Image (tube, grey):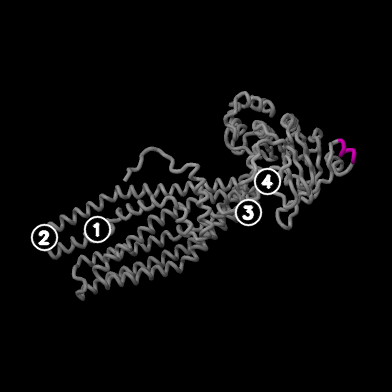
Amino acid sequence: MKKPSTKSKKILNSTDILRREEQFIDCYRKYNGKGLHILFGLYKGDYKNLFFSSLFFIIKQLPVWVIPLVTADVINVIIERPQNSGMRLIIDFIIAVVVLIQNIPTHMLHSHFFSKAKRRVEAGLRGAMIRKLQQLSIGFHKEMPTGKIQSKVMRDVENVEALSSQIFNVVMRVIIDISVTMTIVITKSIPVFLMFLVCIPFFALIMAKFKKPLKDKNKEFRKTVENTSSSVIDMIELVPVTRAHALEDKEIKKITNEVTDVAHKGYKLDFIQSLFGSVIWVFMSLAQIVCLFFTGFLAYKGMIKSVGDITLYQTYFTSLLGHVNSIVAILPILAKGLESVNSIGEILCAGDIEDNNGKAKIKNLEGNYEFKNVFFKYDKNTPVLNGLSIKVNKGETIALVGESGSGKSTIINMVTGFYTATAGEIFIDGKNIEEIDLHSYRRFISVVPQKTILFSGTIKDNITYGNPRISKERLDEVIEASQLRSVIDKLPKGINTSVGEHGDKLSGGQKQRIAIARAIIRDPKVIIFDEATSALDSASEVEIQKAIDHLTKDRTTFIVAHRLSTIRNADKIAVIRNGECVEFGTYEELMEKKGEFYFLKSLQS
């Protein structure tokens, strides 16, 4: 067999992740909630590693079965003193030393093969979940709190890894040890074997009684922890808002109640686990006493000839009870792990994904859009768009205005392909949006959201996100166009200045300019501004407006506008009310009309 390589080599690559994602999803769908079946299915492709791991595991376990036999033989030799007693003691000594020493290399080989398989599944699960999360719809992400997703990707995969370790180490050891022990015992004494045989099912019955409540309490506890984790993340993000409105006490009370609920659920789980452990310990101790007196009685009756055999049976029986105790100890881990296996399936088996298979790839985008009688509903009782019809020509800038909840952001989400129409049609360059590969389409668009999303890193990292090989000349052009030069020149490390977590070291205007620079650097054919200046002061707004004017030149542009004064230069303005376009025209045309837009503008004036 090949010696394990000492070279640093990744046990999984991106191709493996893709293949395993399909394998894992098939496994979940095939076994649908059957935790153990799913777990073993996850290891498909690593059965060879598991086989060698199991082989070396059996070999390394030899001391557990051989040492009691050697001990019994040594006792018998000392008491009975046969003619070859010296040679038997030497042989017993050699056997004991050999089986003990071999444990080191065989244990390492077992660990090598098992760890390789386990870590491949662990990395594969996380990789598959990350890929799936990128494929799932925006609607799914809005429904599933970030805290829950984070818990599934990190905590639940850790629980599955722990479950694997317990099953392939503890459970397998228990099964093998019990099988070998019972085989040895039945060859030496049928009555002792029968006594062993009665005890094991008895303990199994006790464990079965606790299985359902343990599973239910673990599920309850897991869901409570997930909800609290999500609430804590929301609380951290809302700290500035909470502090600004003096709502600290209210937020503390809310989160404390949730934390207390976690503690209460945890207490109930701890209680049933403690009761389970206590009951098992008492019965195990009673069983050891029964074994001692039962084998003593058999020896008294002459049914056990050798004194050493009493020690052998007592050792084996204690070992069996120890295995039962091991099962008792890991039952919470097994219950938690199986619950986590099913929890991961909530992501891997989610069907709300964007399917681009077989659809036409976009090789070039002109930027012509047409909404024809488009309806959209989040659910049956929440209509958002009601027969919307709008046409936007290549290179035009269209501003969407209207009251909050009128459907403006939904239109933008439909332009990006995040939502599909419940009824009606959307055409891009004359092609139905449902017939095109949205992934290829989005390469030609850029979005500047109302809430700027920056990641921890430098200004340069955030600007060049997704485009790391941009030349210095191009980067300088983008910085000038986005009105960022004055900002960067004032910073100690310039473009290499860290923005902090979520860009917290920068002002709103600075963050927005970085978002615009990120959009410019992609050189998009279509640009979308979702209330990009609504949260800025007047000075910042002027700077941002300059950057926007530069960015929209010769590009089809959609602007969701809060401040109507910022859209005077838009080619067309669409006034949205209750999901319908009630007015459509230039700024001057709509002001002259003195209709809905004129009313909204008057309110702001």
What element does badge 1 sit on?
A: helix
The residues tagged by marks 1 and 3 sit, at their Cα atoms, a distance apart of 59 Å
The tag earlier along the polypeptide, 1 or 4, is 1
Q: Is residue 164 left or right of residue 140?
A: left
Q: Which residue is mark 1?
A: 67
Of the residues shown, which amino acid type is indicated by label 1? Ile
Q: Check disc 4 and give the amino acid type.
A: Glu
Look at mark 2 in the image and give the residue it sits on.
84
Which residue does the image show at 39% across and 55% down from the upper left? 168
Chain-order first, disc 1 or disc 3: 1
Q: Amino acid at mark 2?
A: Asn
The reply to whether the C-beta atoms of the residues labelled 2 and 1 are less than 8 Å apart is no
The residues tagged by marks 2 and 4 sit, at their Cα atoms, a distance apart of 89 Å
Residue at x-position 73% and y-position 33%: 555
Q: Quadrant of residue 502?
A: top right
Q: Residue at coordinates 36% horizontally, 39% vertically from top-left?
A: 6
**Looking at the image, is mark 1 or mark 3 nearer the viewer?**
1
Q: Residues within 10 Å of mark 4 (few under 14, many from 20)?
A: few
Looking at the picture, how far across and down is residue 570, in whole percent?
Answer: 80, 35
Over which residues does the magenta segment extend?
A: 588-593
Quadrant of the snapshot with the C terminus: top right
- Label 1 or label 4, whichever lies nearer to me, is 4
Q: The disc labelled 3 sits on which kind of residue?
A: Lys
Going from N to C along the chain, the mark reached first, 3 or 2, is 2
Measuring from the top left, give residue 404's x and y in whole percent. Answer: 77, 46
Q: Mark 4 — residue?
A: 435
